[in-house]
Amino acid sequence: MDDARRVLLRDFLLGASGVWILNQFIFFDVPFDISVVHVLITGLVAGGCGWFQYLSEHQAFPSRFYDVRDYLRNNPLQTVLFTAIGIATVCLPLVLNSALVGFYYAGFIGMYLGFLGYRFVFGVVRPVPEGALNRS
């Protein structure tokens, strides 16, 4: 399997896991009312995630960003610690106020849709960028 197909398969499987989460909520009683605000949050997060991935794969960030990314890839223990701290920080407001579940749900769905949309454009419609091929 060539690098482009490997990137497509990996990224679409990651995005499909998010679609599976969406499927579970849609067909098994959403615990909140979906509003226009939720749809807007989903769209904004999807656009932001796609834009972030575009900038990342087209080497548009300062070199410090890529140095940290490479360091975390080479040091799995620090990656786990960094990820755990990030998840705890992001989820703390949800623990303190359960009314935010709908907003978090919209944000996560937007993240997965942005990820899938970007990979569809830069993988199926257009070629996979060199930045993605180099990381596989």
Image (cartoon, rainbow, N blue to C red):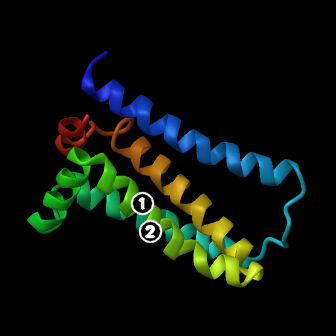
> Contact, CB < 8 Å: mark 2 with mark 1?
yes
Q: Residue furthest front?
A: 77
The local crowd at label 1, few if under 14, some if 14 to 19, many if 20 or more residues have their Cα within 10 Å, is: few
Query: Residue drawn 17% across and 40% down?
Result: 130
Q: Is residue 50 visible?
A: no
Please give the residue where the numbered disc 1 appears in the rendered image: 83
Question: Which dot marks residue 86?
Answer: 2
Can residue 10 be seen here?
yes
From the top left corner, tell me how far across and down residue 62 is, in percent.
Answer: 12, 68
Where does the N terminus fall, quadrant-wise?
top left
Q: Residue at x 16, y 58 (%)?
A: 66
In the figure, is residue 9 to the left or right of 134? right
Residue 32 x/y as whole percent: 84, 71
Residue 20, quarter of the rendered image: top right
Q: Residue at x 24, y 57 (%)?
A: 56
Q: Secondary structure at mark 2?
A: helix
Q: In the picture provided, is 59 more to the left or to the right than 24?
A: left
| Amino acid type of the residue tagged 1 in the rendering | Thr
Q: Position of residue 88 (x, y in %)?
A: 53, 70
